Amino acid sequence: MTPPTHYAVEYAINPWMDTSTPVDVRVAHAQWENLRQTYLALGHRVDLVEPVPGLPDMVYAANGGFVAHDIALVARFRFPERAGESRAYADWMSSMGYQPISTRHINEGQGDLLMVGEMVLAGYGFRTDVRAHPEISAALRMPVVSLELIDPRFYHLDTAVAVLDDRTIAYYPPAFTEAAQQQLHALFPDAIVVGSADAYVLGLNVVSDGLHVVLPSAATGFAAQLRELGFEPVGVDLSELLKGGGSVKCCTLEVFT
Ligand code: ARG
């Protein structure tokens, strides 16, 4: 996780961002700290990446890359405003003993790359370039399923899909092309389908350990669906971070060992 020390909405690169809406960095920090404490209370380890001045979106650590087993893939960002983050995340990976790999084409890390079991669901359409998908598959030595996103509100895959355990996902069908919806249905016939009210508070932007699902507290309908299936939803309020277009998962780069 990267502390929101320099967090701000100074530019608008997704429909959630409105530069005329003030952001309270103090509240953002308290909410982010509450997310960190939630992970610690659940028994997770949390490492911190050093925030860099002038990179207000660095708090969305999920976009910094993808780390699984012994492989660390560093992001290549779509927008110049975020380009400097690649260096910062690559430095962090190196400090952790990884040799960061980059892709030729744009990839926005775990924003668009979600591991389910031993496969990777990969989004494209707004940020990650579909041509990066085969590069990613080769680097990670994992099959990659390419899914096309069509609604700009759900510009990263992690706003439209939640991975709950090694074979269970939840998703919001209208975020995807017809073809991608069919792919998801074929792969995950028992997936949870969430409604618009939950999707529009970024309810799918979650981190799950297979039992506890840390999710935006406003996603009450999704929380009820999760409980029904035996998961334990843990709601957190990240309203200040939502102003930048992110929530729980966006603030978290998961390290799969
Ligand atoms: N403002 C950031 C951007 O538009 C938000 C990124 C949210 N992160 C995510 N994993 N969806 O790039």
Image: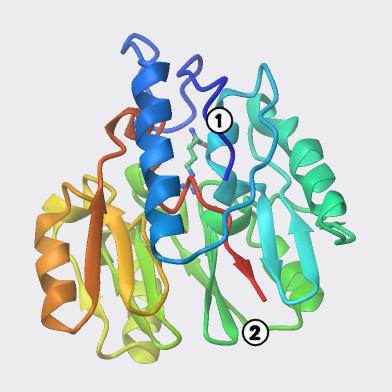
> Up-down: is 252 above or below 214?
above
Q: Which mark is residue 143?
A: 2
User: Does dot 1 land on a helix, a strand or a loop?
Assistant: helix
Total numbered circles: 2
Mark 2: which amino acid?
Answer: Pro
> Up-down: is 168 above or below 181?
below
- Residue 2 in the figure: left or right of residue 106: left
**Residue 38 visible within the image:** yes
- Residue 240 in the figure: left or right of residue 257: left
**Residue 131 visible within the image:** no
Give coordinates of residue 228: x percent, y percent: 11, 80
Disc 2 versus disc 1: distance between alpha carbons? 29 Å
Q: Which residue is mark 1?
A: 57
Rendered residue at 44%/54% (across/down): 249
Give coordinates of residue 123: x percent, y percent: 51, 62
Pointer 1 residue Cβ closer than 8 Å to ligand 1:
yes
Quarter of the image for the N terminus: give it: top right
